[in-house]
Each structure stands twice: as structure tokens, then as C-alpha cells.
């Protein structure tokens, strides 16, 4: 199963693998793509993606962070504006809005679903709120209707951070990213599908905002707005702002990565279904152990299970989360982790002045959470081993308490 010093169940650096047919398709792109960026693979990937997530426009970019940076620029937030978001998320949900000079305001999570709620957002809303960032964390969609209602009433823009939720749907069968103004997706190596390690997608609803994206994504490059007498005069292409003072980036994704995206997108629903089936089996098999409380998926929601987090409650056995992790790591060699340090506890956000928060559920969950290894290609025997190891650990902690 693994070498002497390797964990028996590793925390894998990749969430998925490519099939031989997928690799053939990607190699063909390596051989034939001309140009190797912004060509036919990009056009096909974006078109298929927009159809998949049911949003009007999709733009391939270099990462989920780049998608969030573009969304932040498109909201035109700046100093004096509040941006509300959960602190129980990866730092990239927040950094792009800090870069714009906005004031970051933390909203709490629900203790059962582990995602932000309309009520929590309403509690920190002010007349200065210009943007709400929702994060569909661990593969579960946020309940969007109350948030969209608040946003509509106040003219607030909504960014959906879908980095962990491509293919997740809510109880109205709506795709993650199809409800707010912007959807930001990641194809980073850990994600349910990957474009060779890095990559992302920005989706946009509004026609006028979408028109700004090509220039914003590629150094403000465009054609000249007059007929050129000679194609080389005055130059090959023009460079300009779409909006004064919004400087552009280069966030274009290469053609080979787009080819990987095309083939992985065809299979992402199947990969998600396998994850969901395993997560359910794991939680059901451990239902006799109230010490572990898994993320609650409300009726009608499809959770795509980017991760397998749980709250560890050892009050009955007098054991702590760290006792549980210690036995899993050292006795069973299962490499679990603790994820998503509340953002207001990181030096970066404290130094920037965003170290204050009133988020008791975020703190409570983080301080008792565990996350099981959960890559899609984990062999069945490893998965079953992890389940047995978890049972054995919980039994042992109970026996030790007796
Ligand atoms: C919730 C969340 N937002 C944003 C990102 C940033 O995505 P990327 O790593 O592709 O920049 C990630 C993933 O890493 C994430 O998990």
C-alpha cells in the first residue's frame, strides 16, 4: 500500500487523475495548438463550461485566485467600501478584495452546513456594503435566495466563490455560480477537476461587464477602432483601458490546459458522484459514533464533496480532537489535516486591520474540526482501511475513558 515512512493513507497532492484517452487528447493539443494560448481549445472550453454551469459568459484564467481578482476589479470596490465574506474559507476568497483597498467584514457560518448564511450576512450589513462574497465550501452550495434578496434590495453585487463546488446544485437544481453576478472556479491540483495543476474560470452574467473581461484578462489588448489602411499600421494591436484607471492583467490560460479542461469537464459529474457516494458511505458507516459530526447537506442539495470534514466532539469520552488525530496519524498512518484557519487569525489579515470578528461558530468549528484524506482516485482498499482505522480509533478512545 505504501513505503515504510509513507502514510498508509496520504493527504494526496492531487484530487483526480487523467484517463489514457484524456491524455491522448491533451497530447494532441500539445502537438497542434497554434497559437498555444487564446485559440480554439479556449473557445471550446469556455463554451462548454458556460453551458455546464448555466451562466451566460465564461472566461478561462490562470487560477481561481485570478478569477476572484478579475471579479474584484469588475465590482470596482475600493477604499470606503465594505465587502462581506465568511472567514471560514481559503485566503484567496478575501485577498483580491483586500488588494482593491476594500474593508473586509467577516460573516459567521452555520454550525451544521459549515457555510455562510443570509442571517449571518444581514447581521454585518451596513450602508457601505458594496459586495457580498459567498463561498460554497467543501462542495456544498450556500442557500442563495435570502442573500440575493438582500443584495437586490440594496444594489449589492454578489460574487460566488465556486472554487470547491463545480457541479454542486441546490434544492432548485441550480448550479453553483449560476445565481450571483460572478462565479469564480478553480482547477487547482486538489480540486475535483484540474487543468494540469493550476487554472480557473470566471463566469459573468451581465453583458456590459462581460465585454470588459477580454481586455482586463489580457493587458488591455484589442484592435484599433478605425479601419487600418495597412494591417501593420500603426501596429499589430492596440492597448487601452476599458474603464479609466482599472489596470489590466495577463491571466490567460494556455491551450494545453484548456484541452485538459475540456476532457475533465466531460467527466466531472461522474467524479463528483463517486465522491458523494463515498462520503455518504463513510458517514453512514460511522453513524453509531456521535463523536464525529459530518457536514450537513440539506434536502435537495447535491454536495460534490471536495473534502470530507467533520466536527470531533469528544466530551463523552474526555478525548480531544488532537487525541483523535494523533491516533489516526501515528497508530494508523492516516494523514488527516485541520483546514481553514479563520482568516482573521492570520498575520496577513491582522496586519491589514481585519483581525476583529464576531464569528463564534467559525471559531468553534475550526477548533474542533478534522478533515479526512479524500482524493477521488483513493484506492478502495485505502478507503476501507481509513474507515476501519476511524472506527478503531473511536472505540479505543471510548475504552480508554471507561
Ligand atoms: C474557497 C477557495 N477560493 C479560492 C481558491 C483559489 O483557487 P486557486 O488555488 O486556483 O487560485 C481556492 C483554492 O485553492 C479555494 O479553495
Image (cartoon, rainbow, N blue to C red):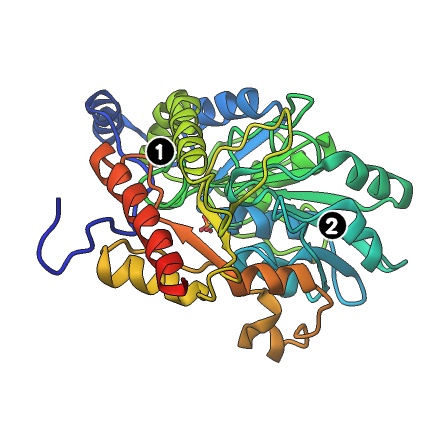
Please provide percent x and percent y for residue 234.
Answer: 53, 43
**What secondary structure is marked by label 1?**
helix
Judged from this view, the residue extending furthest toward the bottom is: 351
| Residue toward you, 388 or 352 | 388
- Give the Cα separation between the discs numbered 1 and 2: 32 Å
Task: Place residue 384 in its image quadrant.
Answer: top left
**What secondary structure is marked by label 2?**
strand
Between tags 1 and 2, which lies in front?
2
Q: Which residue is mark 2?
A: 132
| Residue toward you, 256 or 199 | 199
In the image: residue 297, left or right of residue 377: right
Task: Place residue 172 in its image quadrant.
Answer: top right
Q: Which residue is mark 1?
A: 255
Residue drawn at the location 70% of the way across and 31% of the way down: 179
N-terminal of the pair, mark 1 or mark 2, is: 2
> Does the image show residue 139?
yes
Vertical comparison of 87 with 281: above or below = below
Quadrant where the N terminus is found in the figure: top left
Please provide percent x and percent y for residue 51.
Answer: 55, 20
Amino acid at each position: 500500500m505504501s513505503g515504510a515512512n509513507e502514510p498508509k493513507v496520504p493527504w494526496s497532492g492531487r484530487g483526480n487523475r487523467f484517463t489514457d484517452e484524456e491524455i491522448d487528447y491533451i497530447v494532441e493539443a500539445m502537438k497542434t495548438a497554434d497559437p498555444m494560448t487564446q485559440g480554439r481549445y479556449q473557445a471550446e472550453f469556455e463554451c462548454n463550461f458556460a453551458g455546464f454551469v448555466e451562466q451566460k459568459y465564461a472566461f478561462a484564467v490562470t487560477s481561481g485566485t485570478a478569477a476572484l481578482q478579475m471579479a474584484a476589479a469588475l465590482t470596482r470596490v475600493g477604499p470606503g467600501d465594505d465587502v462581506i465574506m465568511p472567514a471560514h474559507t481559503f485566503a484567496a476568497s478575501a485577498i483580491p478584495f483586500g488588494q482593491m483597498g476594500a474593508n473586509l467584514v467577516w460573516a459567521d457560518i452555520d454550525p451544521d452546513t459549515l457555510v455562510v448564511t443570509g442571517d449571518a450576512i444581514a447581521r454585518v450589513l451596513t450602508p457601505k456594503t458594496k459586495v457580498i462574497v459567498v463561498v460554497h465550501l467543501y462542495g456544498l452550495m450556500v442557500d442563495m435566495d435570502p442573500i440575493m434578496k438582500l443584495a437586490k434590495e440594496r444594489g449589492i453585487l454578489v460574487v460566488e466563490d465556486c472554487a470547491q463546488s463545480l457541479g454542486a446544485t441546490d434544492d432548485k437544481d441550480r448550479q453553483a455560480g449560476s445565481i450571483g453576478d460572478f462565479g469564480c472556479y478553480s482547477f487547482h491540483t486538489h480540486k475535483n477537476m484540474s487543468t494540469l495543476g493550476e487554472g480557473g474560470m470566471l463566469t459573468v452574467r451581465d453583458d456590459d461587464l462581460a465585454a470588459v473581461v477580454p481586455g482586463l484578462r489580457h493587458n488591455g489588448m484589442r484592435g484599433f477602432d478605425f479601419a487600418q489602411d495597412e494591417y501593420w499600421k500603426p501596429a499589430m494591436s492596440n492597448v487601452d483601458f476599458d474603464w479609466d484607471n482599472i489596470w489590466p492583467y495577463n491571466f490567460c490560460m494556455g491551450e494545453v490546459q484548456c484541452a485538459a479542461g475540456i476532457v475533465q469537464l466531460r467527466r466531472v459529474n461522474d467524479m463528483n458522484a463517486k465522491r458523494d457516494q463515498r462520503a455518504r458511505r463513510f458517514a453512514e458507516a460511522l453513524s453509531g459514533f456521535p463523536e464525529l459530526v459530518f457536514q450537513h447537506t440539506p434536502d435537495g442539495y447535491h454536495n460534490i464533496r471536495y473534502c470530507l470534514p467533520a466536527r470531533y466532539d469528544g466530551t463523552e469520552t474526555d478525548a480531544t480532537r488532537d487525541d483523535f488525530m494523533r491516533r489516526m496519524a501515528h497508530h494508523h498512518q492516516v494523514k488527516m489535516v485541520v483546514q481553514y484557519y479563520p482568516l482573521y487569525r492570520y498575520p496577513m489579515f491582522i496586519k491589514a486591520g481585519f483581525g476583529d470578528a464576531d464569528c463564534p461558530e467559525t471559531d468553534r468549528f475550526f477548533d474542533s474540526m478534522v478533515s479526512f484524506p479524500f482524493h477521488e482516485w483513493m484506492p478502495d482498499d485505502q478507503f476501507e482501511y481509513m474507515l476501519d482505522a476511524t472506527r478503531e480509533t473511536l472505540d479505543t478512545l471510548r475504552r480508554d475513558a471507561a
